Amino acid sequence: MMPVFDATLCGLILAVALAAVAGRDVFRAIVFFIVYGLMLAVAWVRLGALDVALAEAAISGGLTAGLFLVAYGRLAAVGAADEPAGLLNPPAALAGCGLSAALGWAWFALPQPDRPAPQLAEALPRSGVENPVTAVLLNFRAWDTLLESVVLLTALIGVLMLARVGAWPGRPGLAQHVRPGGVMAGFGRVLPPVGLLVGVYLVYVGAERPGGAFQGGTVIAAVGLVATLTGAFRPPAVDAPGWRAALVAGPLLFLLWGLAGAVIGNGFLTFPPTLAGAAILAIEAALAVSIAVTLAVLVLGAPEQAARE
Amino acid sequence: MADLTTYVLTSVGLVFFVAGTLGLLRFPDVFTRLHALTKADNLGLGFIALGVALQAPSWREVALLAVIWVLALLAAGTASQLVARAARAEDEDSG
């Protein structure tokens, strides 16, 4: 039974991917891209990679889709949403094929990786956590995760730079108008508490089971977006001090702890086993806050309302 | 007995999904299509969740399935209201 399911899933993923890149309607492409992200998440579940599945569903299916929809809305607002005539966009097609070919080449060129199970099982007790994925992300390969969190912050700075002079320093994004007592307003009051619970749980449980700062942070960002779009919450102006503290809390704590490792441990970003568990929990919590705020503001965009009402 | 009930309940759920999909493809306008879609979402998912719940090893899974169903209801209900309102606004604009 399962081979049939897997074959169907693979076929659907390919078909949806094709539908997303072929076709000229931008909105249609975005919808197919969202479906593609969800299908990939199911595929990761089938491969037993629950952490990747969570990240895929939250980031690709949820957040990137949100970014695309916002971009589409802005393109439509200036009348640029319609793709120009012509079935094929040669530069984009060439770039896409080139990227696929390079990835395919890399796939065959790389040595077959050994399953890291024995070494990982041996090192896991020293990592401070029980979830091997979290152990790799926050301890053994902490450097990569630190840089990822800095990349996110850099992307946000790039977006905030797009603010118009008169709008700075206002609230991020456009003002939201919601009918009081309507469906949207009700939804915005019911969903956020549940979503917040799920997000915080995902961050906390990351030490033992699938979850972690990126997955939980993305869910919390989505909660913030729902609350903002439904008018239940007004984001503070971009120059509010607490706001900026939240943005840098994760990367900063990560960096400080890395430096502390250089002093009391065996070098930069090395965690002494006795302190590793508590340190990882603290870093994950701070990272989740930073990721949540960064992603939410990325979707809302640079300030566009008059700065001071 | 539990297995048989699971088969029956999930089959009923699948029938609702198939019927909802057919309606989504064949019905003439946005409002009837939304009607078909919400039937599939609400009843189809409800029957499947109920059927799967009979196989759950503990009450924790049953509770999680119930929460999933309620959240799906909430999201589907809200989304269909918003789509319907957008469609009506468009109708009024054009007609």
Image: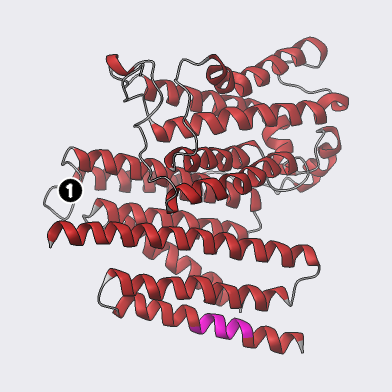
Q: Amino acid at mark 1?
A: Glu
Q: Which residue is mark 1?
A: A83
Instruction: Please indicate whether residue A110 sits to the left or right of residue A86 in the image.
Output: right
Determine crowd level at label 1: few under 14, some 14-19, many 20+ residues with C-alpha closer than 10 A: few
- Which quadrant of the rendered structure holds the N terminus of chain B? bottom right
Is A52 placed above or below A19 here?
A: above
Is A268 placed above or below B82 here?
A: above
Residue at horizontal 44 percent and vertical 43 percent from the top: A230
Residue A186, position as x, y percentages in the image: 49, 50
Q: Is residue B13 magenta?
A: yes
Note whether residue A201 is visible. Answer: yes
Mark 1 secondary-structure assignment: loop
- Which quadrant of the rendered structure holds the C terminus of chain B? bottom left
Q: Residue furthest front?
A: A181
Residue B70, position as x, y percentages in the image: 59, 63
Instruction: Please indicate whether residue A100 sits to the left or right of residue A73 in the image.
Output: right
Residue at horizontal 63 percent and vertical 29 percent from the top: A287
Pick the front one: B54 or A24: B54
Pick the front one: A247 or B78: B78
Residue A16, position as x, y percentages in the image: 38, 62
Pick the front one: A56 or A184: A184
What is the count of numbered marks? 1
Residue at horizontal 17 percent and vertical 41 percent from the top: A80
Magenta segment main secondary structure: helix
- Give the image quarter of residue A270: top right
Instruction: Identify the subunit bearing mark 1.
Output: A
Is B89 placed above or below B18 here?
A: above
Q: Which residues are magenta?
A: B9-15
Pick the front one: A171 or A88: A171
